[in-house]
Amino acid sequence: MTTKSMSLDQLKPGQCGTILEVAGSGAIRRRLLDLGFRKGEVVKFIKTAPLRDPLQVSLGNGHITIRKSEASLVQVEVLLSTVRE
C-alpha cells in the first residue's frame, strides 16, 4: 500500500490528511504552528472561497481560514477514508 503525500492546498474538499511537516520560516511558520498545524495532527479540507483563495480547513475542534500560499507550506499524508462531520 502506498501513501500519497501532497501540500494541504492540493487536497480536494472533504479529503483528510495527517500533517507530516510545516515548512516556511519566520512569522509565517510561527503563525501556522500557533494555529495548531503540527506534525501528526489530522486536518480536513472543507472548501475554497469563490476565487480559490483563501481555504477553509477543519483542525482540532475548529475551522480555520488560511491563504493558499500558507496552505502550500503544510505537507500532508492523504488519508484514504474520509471523516464525516
Image: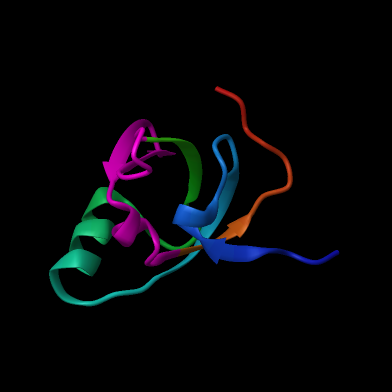
Q: Residue furthest bottom?
A: 25
Q: Residue furthest front?
A: 51
Magenta segment:
49-74
The front one of 60 and 54 is 54
**Residue depicted at x 47% and y 56%:** 8
Q: Quadrant of the C terminus?
A: top right
In the image, 79: left or right of 64? right
In the image, 38: left or right of 83? left
Q: Residue furthest top?
A: 85
**Residue depicted at x 58% and y 35%:** 14
Residue 82 vs 10, above or below: the answer is above
The front one of 72 and 74 is 72
Picture quadrant where residue 18 is located: bottom right
**Residue depicted at x 29% and y 40%:** 65
Disc tally is: 0
In percent of width and height, residue 34 lies at 22, 55
**Residue depicted at x 52% and y 55%:** 10
In percent of width and height, residue 5 lies at 62, 66
In percent of width and height, residue 66 lies at 28, 47
In percent of width and height, residue 35 lies at 25, 49
State the colouring used for the structure image.
rainbow
